[in-house]
Amino acid sequence: MATASRSAFITGRALSRAAPTRARRTAGVVRAAKEGRQSLFVTVTVKEGKMDEYNELIQGHITNCFANDRCMYFDYGIPVDGDPNVVHLYEVYEDEAAYKEHKASAHLKDYVEKAEALTSSTTTMKLLTLAQYGSVNCNYAGECELSGEWD
């Protein structure tokens, strides 16, 4: 069962409130995120002529991750300079358990099976545990997580 989301990307509707123009400061020292966030960096090489198909596939996969996993952030981009067939993915999961749930998910298996026909075997992955003070997590609604709580 899909969970409700406030993301315009997932629902295709405008958000009920605009993102703030500037994050509010609640303290002099900002503790960016709860301990144990798992971040995954993936580099994918898409086969020549398959980028449109891959874009459609990865957009569906991102939607599934937000709807079914405890995925806090998922983005992808193509380098400005360099090979136009290389895609970088960046994912953040709540904790190690959330990442393991994602790895075991049916939608990840489905994505991997479909991506095999569109990508080369040069895919690389790097998993990191995010430093607690490394970044401030913000969602699409413009809410930012400070001290492990959504502002």
Image: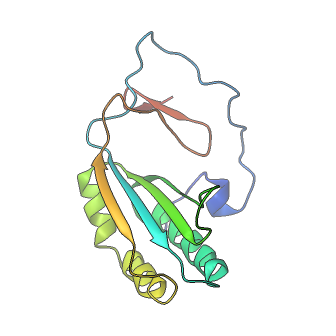
Q: Which of the pair 80/73 is nearer the observer?
A: 80
Image spot of residue 15 (x, y percent)? 71, 48
The reply, left or right, for residue 108 in relation to residue 18 is left
Residue drawn where x is 56% and y is 55% of the image = 5
Query: Quadrant of the image for the N terminus?
Result: bottom left
User: Relative to residue 56, is residue 15 depicted above or below?
Assistant: above
Asked whether residue 1 is in view, the answer is: no
Image coordinates of residue 106 in percent, x first then y, are 36, 79
Residue 98 at what x, y percent from top left? 30, 57
Q: Residue furthest right?
A: 14
Is residue 101 shown to the viewer in this render? yes
Q: How many numbered circles are shown? A: 0
Q: Front-most of 145 and 5? A: 145
Q: Residue furthest bottom?
A: 117
Q: Is residue 110 left or right of residue 50?
A: left
Of 134 and 7, which appears nearest the observer? 134
What colour scheme was applied to this rendering of the protein?
Answer: rainbow
Q: Nearer the viewer, residue 39 or 1?
A: 39
Residue found at the far front of this picture: 82
Left or right for 60, reference 121: right
Q: Is residue 8 above or below residue 120?
A: above
Q: Which residue is painted at 60% across and 51% down in the image?
A: 6
Residue sitting at x 42%, y 83% = 110
Q: What is the x, y in percent for residue 54? A: 58, 78
Quarter assignment of residue 56:
bottom right
Instruction: Look at the picture and state if 5 lies above or below 53.
Output: above
User: In this rendering, would 127 be left or right of 150?
Assistant: left
